[in-house]
């Protein structure tokens, strides 16, 4: 796969009032929690794990999955899967992650794909296949916070790619879950987003 062109951007695909309704729904009905890395989840009492985790990831999140949000996002996943010629099989999604990035908060380079299938719950035996990130905030209300891919450039080198036309409120970027990506530090204001992972049978 040509990773440099392995993502799909949908500029302004979601109505701005839909974005506002999502933010209002989450903040009215739910309390945000500090985002944790896998290392922190595995070692919750470890000071070293907490320190390393905060170097990698700083934000506040809440997991949600109301049908009115899920159905809107799944429609975009289906289009991206076809337009990208990925033709991945998938059957479910994890709960959707609402994220708020404040000043100096970020998420370092990482891949969404786990090395093994899920072992519990309704996703047992499935793997992450397609990831999406939704920008819910007007870009005039924050600075920084750019979404960034890390793409192989040959000879063991990588280059940074910032998707064009993804900064606008209501825009979505969709990509295979193994592609390495990050969110740069927010330098002013707050940026809200949604992340959804679509899951299916392991690749063969």
Image (tube, helix red, strand yellow):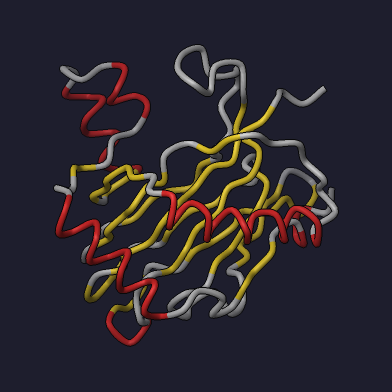
Q: Residue at coordinates 26% horizontally, 25% vertically from top-left?
A: 49
Instruction: From the top left corner, tell me how far across and down residue 30 is, in percent.
Output: 17, 49
**Does 131 sit above or below residue 164?**
above
Looking at the image, which is closer to me, 154 or 100? 100
Left or right placement of residue 186 versus residue 121 in this view: left
Q: Residue at coordinates 23% horizontally, 50% vertically from top-left?
A: 60
Q: Among all residues in the image, which is located at the extreme front?
A: 67
Instruction: From the top left corner, tell me how far across and down residue 7 is, in percent.
Output: 69, 59
Instruction: From the top left corner, tell me how far across and down residue 29 is, in percent.
Output: 16, 52
Q: Quadrant of residue 124?
A: top right
Q: Quadrant of residue 115?
A: top right
**Does 28 sit above or below residue 136?**
above
Instruction: From the top left corner, tell me how far across and down residue 126 is, in percent.
Output: 62, 23
Left or right placement of residue 18 versus residue 168 in this view: left
Q: Residue at coordinates 32% horizontally, 78% vertically from top-left?
A: 143
**Does 143 sit above or below residue 83?**
below
Q: Quadrant of the C terminus?
A: top right
């Amino acid at each position: 796969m040509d990773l440099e062109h392995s993502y799909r951007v949908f500029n302004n695909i979601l109505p701005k009032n839909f974005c506002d309704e999502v933010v209002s729904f989450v903040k009215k009905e739910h309390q945000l929690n500090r985002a944790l890395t896998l290392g922190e989840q595995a070692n919750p009492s470890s000071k070293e794990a907490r320190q390393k985790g905060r170097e990698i990831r700083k934000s506040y999140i809440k997991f949600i999955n109301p049908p009115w949000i899920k159905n809107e996002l799944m429609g975009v996943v289906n289009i991206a899967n076809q337009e990208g010629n990925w033709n991945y099989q998938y059957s479910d999604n994890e709960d959707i992650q609402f994220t708020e990035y404040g000043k100096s908060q970020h998420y370092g380079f990482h891949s969404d794909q786990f090395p093994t299938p899920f072992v519990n719950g309704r996703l047992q035996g499935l793997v992450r296949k397609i990831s999406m990130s939704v920008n819910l905030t007007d870009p005039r209300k924050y600075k920084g916070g750019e979404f960034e891919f890390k793409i192989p450039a040959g000879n063991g080198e990588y280059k940074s790619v910032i998707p064009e036309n993804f900064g606008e409120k209501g825009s979505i970027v969709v990509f295979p879950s193994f592609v390495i990506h990050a969110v740069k530090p927010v330098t002013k204001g707050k940026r809200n987003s949604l992340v959804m992972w679509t899951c299916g049978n392991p690749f063969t």
